[in-house]
Image (cartoon, rainbow, N blue to C red):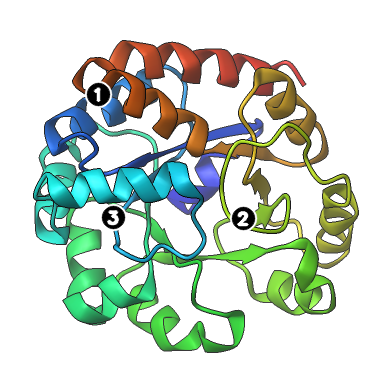
Amino acid sequence: MNKIAEAFDNKKAFIPFVTAGDPDLDTTRELLLAMQEAGADLIEIGIPFSDPVAEGPVIQEADLRALQSGTTTDRIFDMVHSIKDRMRVPMVFMTYINPIYVYGTEKFAKKAKECGVSGVIVPDVPFEEKGEIDAVFAEQGLTVISMIAPTSASRVKMIAKEAKGFLYCVSSLGVTGVRAQINSGISELIQVVREITDIPCAIGFGISTPEQAREMASISDGAIVGSAIVKIVAQYGKDSVPHVAEYVRSMKEAVMSV
């Protein structure tokens, strides 16, 4: 079984996101281990970028802090590599095409594989252009995760048919960030996917409370949370690890209660 698929094996998955290097890479290392212990089923590691088009202000600011603290792609690879033998849950990098191209797509894929990562999410690569990176990552046994959004209605079937690992279902239009209300159209979107494939669907963008996580997990295979965690890191900095662990524990419990 693909390691990403294991995250959803007979259970609803909770998937936290953290920006690598915010406030520093030592803290990120501790956060990854603590989130795993707190019940995370798969972890997204954000590679900071100066122009993250899919992100709202919370993650934009985290990217800025990470870059200012001297975080580089190489240093992120080294940090993840240093704990790969202790990480039992799958990890995926979330980044943009520019950092991958600048680093060199083949070199990036190779290094990601070496540090124990299972795949990548690249929000600014449209489905039609995914083939360019797909083959390179597949060569290393890595999965490029596809995203679908309420706007992709006409393309959902096409994307779902070829999706691997899991489908990242964007709950609402716009950028990432905490939201009071989650788009109700998301359940219809998932129904369309279900007609095509049995690939797991996890919902992200806007989830911040256990109630929202429970609601989203009830109509899908899991909940993805980024901005709410990044906010905790912004608030507590190097002392954020126990606070994030407690939050992940409560969110995992909510997802499991479905």
**Residue 2: image location, x then y, percent:** 47, 54
**Label disc, if present, on residue 168 of the rendered structure:** 2
**Residue 229: image location, x then y, percent:** 45, 29
Q: Amino acid at mark 2?
A: Tyr
Residue 175 visible in the shown view: yes
- Mark 1 / mark 3, whichever is N-terminal: 3
**Residue 164: image location, x then y, percent:** 57, 65
Q: Is residue 34 left or right of residue 239?
A: right
Q: Amino acid at mark 3?
A: Pro
**Label disc, if present, on residue 48 of the rendered structure:** 3
Residue 91 visible in the shown view: no
Cα distance in 3D space between marks 1 and 3: 16 Å
**Label disc, if present, on residue 159 of the rendered structure:** none
In the image, residue 44 above or below residue 121:
above
- Mark 3 / mark 2, whichever is N-terminal: 3
Q: Secondary structure at mark 3?
A: loop
- Mark 1 / mark 2, whichever is N-terminal: 2
Q: Is residue 114 left or right of residue 88?
A: left
Callout 1 crowding tier (Cα within 10 Å): few <14, some 14–19, many ≥20: some
